[in-house]
Image (cartoon, grey):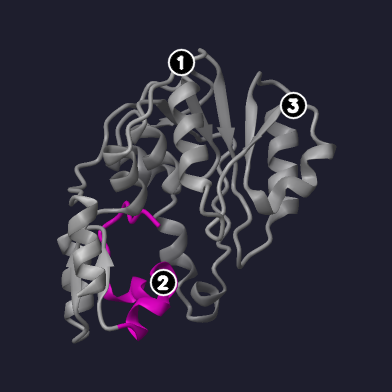
Amino acid sequence: MWIWWDFEDRDVEWAFDPNHLNRSGSLVQNQAIADVIIAREHPSLAVGLPFLQFNKYHPVEAKRNGKTLYASTHSTAWRDVSQTTLAAVQEFSKNHDVTVMLSLKDLKIAPLLSCPYVVGACATDPESFYRIQKLFSEYEYLISDRMGSHILYALACGMKVGLSAKYNIDTVFSEVALRSGLESRAREIRDTQFLADRFPGLVIEDDIPKYTTMPDIAVVPPEITAQIIWS
């Protein structure tokens, strides 16, 4: 996932894939994160993020349709939050003309929606990057009710992005964070004031999304990453 805050050692267990620490080395987003992992006496290299690498070295031509894509909180391969997603989409779509992007794990709620939908991503689906790159290159605007990697991916594809303050979902879904007494930490990095200060213009009320500033995340060529993985 995209780490949009200043990563600390206490974030490793709840916000970092714990499987990385069971391998011979970790490939991470940037050097600041690598330094945290290295401090645990575990090898780590900064290579950027997989989707950014894919998008940069697999360009796609698409025409913007002028429409708005709504990305709500979503279920993953390891966590089902579909009822939260359903309630959020139903509430937001009452007064907004949007197409909602559903994860593969949330497609079961599609028949209950009154707005159009498209299929987004899933960590276990190898076609995910192709699909979301196409969507994020065709739609003009992205509105979300929860901070996450989809914000970064949309920016990378040239969308105008906004995080809704009114509909923001700051629920802590991480069982590890809850179990480890880190709920406040998991919540503070999603706080709308924190995000508004860190990304001026990203947090919106009911206005049109306008944020387009791509974070400075270096991306190494895929062949370099492949060499590191197979060395």
Tell me the residue at 61%/63% (across/down).
77
* Mark carried by residue 17: 2
Residue 199: horizontal and vertical position, in percent? 30, 37
Q: How far apart, in angstroms, are the residues tagged by discs 2 and 1?
A: 34 Å
Tell me the residue at 52%/14% (across/down).
65
Q: Amino acid at mark 1?
A: Arg
The secondary element bearing badge 3 is classed as loop
Magenta stretch in the rendered image: 1-23
Does residue 119 appear left or right of residue 107 in this picture? left
Residue 5 drawn above or below residue 117? below
Tell me the residue at 27%/73% (across/down).
26
Q: Amino acid at mark 2?
A: Asp
Q: Amino acid at mark 3?
A: Cys
Q: Which residue is mark 3?
A: 115
Residue 213: horizontal and vertical position, in percent? 27, 30
Closer-to-camera residue (2/7): 2
Are the two marked residues, 2 and 3, in contact with CB atoms closer than 8 angstroms? no
Does residue 110 appear left or right of residue 209 in this picture? right
Residue 116 belongs to magenta span: no
Q: How far apart, in angstroms, are the residues tagged by discs 1 and 3?
A: 20 Å
